Amino acid sequence: MTDLHVLRVFMGPDGRGGNPLGVFLDGQAIPPPHRQGVAAELGFSETVWVDAVDDDQRAATIRIFTPGIEMPFAGHPCVGTSWLLHEAGHDVGVLRVPAGDVATRRDGELTWIRGRAAWAGDLIEPQEFPTPEDVDALEPGRLGEPGRYAWAWQDEQAGRIRVRFFPTHVGIVEDEATGLGAVVMGDMLRRPLTISQGVGSELYAQPDPSTGTVDVGGRVQLDGVLEYDAG
């Protein structure tokens, strides 16, 4: 048996929303060949395995799986895992994922990570709609069909946008909150953003054009700890 921590990541200020995330802090309890099957069984949009924590270097090595594929980088798993490691007593400043090193920090109630839009590959291709109501009216496609990342301005002057993401191409009908999408949008629009996604999630993006990176932050909550039969 091993512990599975269940979090909600990118909750709104009123506590609504947040993308569920499963995290195995003892990642070695489940060998890599079995992880894709476990992620599919659990059904979270992403599940994280923490394979190593180096407190001297303030770094942790993690792997991220959707129900359909392994992700080289994803935002809500990195934000949630950083928060959880901090709560567990690890002052982590870097998460090591296959895409590269992800800087992370805490600032009040928000946990931040730093990513690059290039890490998204062709996974997210934003499609702008005229109004937030047009975005809200969209229906998900079927699993296996091309995904859709839809957005519209809620308040352009204030930098607020409405987003929905249907990553049907990676085995997810609709994502409640997408940190990778926030990285892509921050890089594309080149300005600080407040992103409303799903039923109540809120994400913050702060691009740095001088480095080509985007910081993405949000609120995290632990919903529970479950025993998982690693056998």
Image: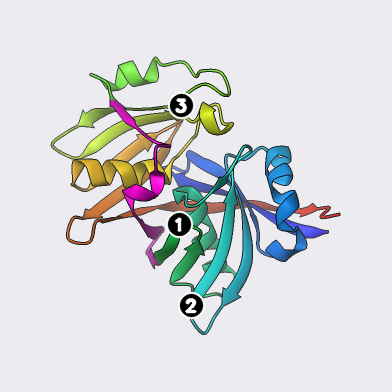
Q: Name the outermost residue toward the right.
A: 231
User: x%, y% of residue 224?
Assistant: 67, 52
Query: Which residue lies under the disc numbered 3?
Result: 147
The span from disc 2 to disc 3 (Cα, nearest Å) is 36 Å
The span from disc 1 to disc 3 (Cα, nearest Å) is 21 Å
The span from disc 2 to disc 1 (Cα, nearest Å) is 18 Å
Which residue is nearer to you in this view: 98 or 186?
98
**Amino acid type at image mark 2:** Arg
User: x%, y% of residue 61?
Assistant: 56, 67
Kind of element beneath mark 3: loop
Q: Is residue 117 magenta?
A: yes
**Amino acid type at image mark 3:** Gly
Query: Which residue lies under the disc numbered 1?
Result: 99
Q: Name the outermost residue toward the left.
A: 157
Question: Which residue does the image show at 73% across and 43% down from the upper left?
Answer: 37
Label 3 CA crowd tier, 10 Å (few <14, some 14–19, many 20+): many
Q: Quadrant of residue 114?
A: bottom left
User: x%, y% of residue 229?
Assistant: 84, 53
Region rendered in magenta: 105-127
Image quadrant holding the C terminus, namely: bottom right
Query: Which residue lies under the disc numbered 2?
Result: 58
